[in-house]
Amino acid sequence: MRLLDYRKDAPLAAGLVAGTVVVFQQPLRWMLDVASEVEHRYNLDLIPALVVLSVVFILHQYRKRQEIKAEAMAAAAEARLERERAEELEQLVTLGRSLANSLDFAAVRQAIWRNLPNFLRTRAIWVVLRERSYWRTLIEDTDTADHTSPAAIESIAALALTRGGDVPLSGSVVVDGYECFPMGSGGTLAGMLVMRVGVDTLTDHQRRALEAALAFLGIAIRNVQLLIETRENSLRDSLTHWFNRGHGHDTLRAELQRSKRNGTPVSVLMFDVDSFKTLNDKYGHQAGDAVLVSVAHAVGDLLRASDVKCRYGGDEFMVILPETPTTGAQQVGEYIRRAISTLHVAAGAEMLTLTTSVGVATATPGELDPESLVARADAALYKAKREGRNRVAVDQLEAVADLTDVPARNVLSFVQ
């Protein structure tokens, strides 16, 4: 326990020293007299030597004390750094555990925000995903003064990919004041973490911690992407990549329930390739498959992202049109008919021209049975067949009651 703090109690310390000198004045004088007598008798400079030794001793003690203080400060800094590293390691373990349990992007987003390393919390960051030929923002910075739009960040990520190579899974790329860190797994790029470059640059230790976090994040994102792809592939037709019949019925059931709640119309188109069986028998199944793929691509380019495309069976297709009355659905059917009539599909040395018949049905107010609605659209399709093919036929049970309250669907919205 220290009795005096020399930085705060300097006057008291000086007083104690002066008092000690006064108390021991006689012994000190006697010691000095003895030293002087020894100097004269033996021709020695004893007092100057004692002064020099005293000064050297004081300087030595001062330097030793400074070294001890510096060592203590270094030990404290090292201990603080070790605590920070332990905290970061604990955060990384927690982040990895949370990401391992994430089965969708919402869970990944929550895991990132909850377990983000401390040195990233005060920085402007974004996480963007690479999905096929486009980028999608998973996490957008909203807590700092940097309000760059997600579209601008996605463009920066795309430019960083161009500058860094096809699959830059190591290092980082700086683009227009933003540093882009790639994330991936198994040699496949899953996305990028984009961070605004500021005055407060990352230390080497922070970069190593960030690389570890990005490794966890890249694996988690890639796993979710593969899970979604597997889930979607199980719902899609392998030839046309349109949804299968079962998923189409489930989606139509949900749309009918939404239509009942919101009072918005929902329509269904059924169409097939005219004389497809004859074409298939004459030119073979490979030519038939090529026809179905060409039809799926041509029709898919006409539809909105909200429209649901299904291969119903064989050469028969179904399209679900949310928020679309009969008039708008009939217009879509006519656009599909015209698009297919312009197709030319190679079958050996010949070029095949195609036509299609389209059936249109709109749900009646409160209708909830998808099978009934599909049956009416299918009946309209066969009506078009009977009337000579290459035409659009409308089911007779139109939902007239609420058509006057719903504007006709703008045909231009189909051209993507």
Image (cartoon, grey):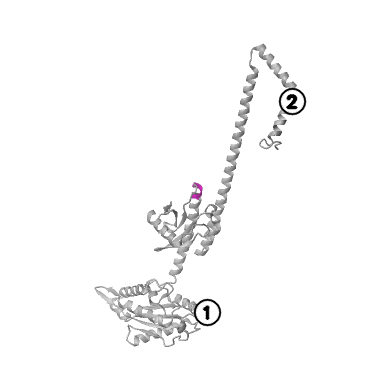
Q: Position of residue 77 (x, y in %)?
A: 58, 43
On the image, the x and y values in percent for residue 268 come to: 42, 80
**Which mark lies nearer to you, 2 or 1?**
2
Image location of residue 42, percent across then percent down: 65, 12
Q: Residue furthest front?
A: 11
What is the secondary structure assignment of the residue under circle 1?
helix
Name the residue nearer the viewer: 84 or 335. Answer: 335
User: For residue 381, which quarter of the picture?
Assistant: bottom left
In the drawing, what numbered circle is on residue 217? none
2 or 1: tag closer to the N-terminus: 2
* Residue situated in front as seen by the camera: 282 or 341: 341
Instruction: Determine if the magenta segment contains residue 206.
Output: yes
- Which picture quadrant has residue 58? top right
Local crowd size for mark 1, using a 10 Å CA cut-off: few (<14), some (14–19), many (≥20): few
Residue under circle 1? 261
Residue type, mark 1 in image: Arg
For the C terminus, give its image quadrant.
bottom left
x and y, in percent, of residue 373 in the image: 45, 83
> Which range is magenta?
204-208
Image-quadrant location for residue 413: bottom left
Say whether residue 353 is magenta: no
- Residue 199, placed above or below residue 136: above
Label 2 environment density (alpha carbons within 10 Å; few <14, some 14–19, many ≥20): few
In the picture, measured across the screen, residue 323 lies left or right of residue 354, that is: right
Give the main secondary structure, helix, strand or loop, of the magenta stretch: helix
Q: Is residue 133 above or below residue 317?
A: above
Above or below 232: residue 156? above
- The reply, left or right, for residue 25 in relation to residue 296 is right
Q: Is residue 166 visible?
A: no
User: Residue under circle 2?
Assistant: 22
Placement of the N terminus among the 4 image quadrants: top right
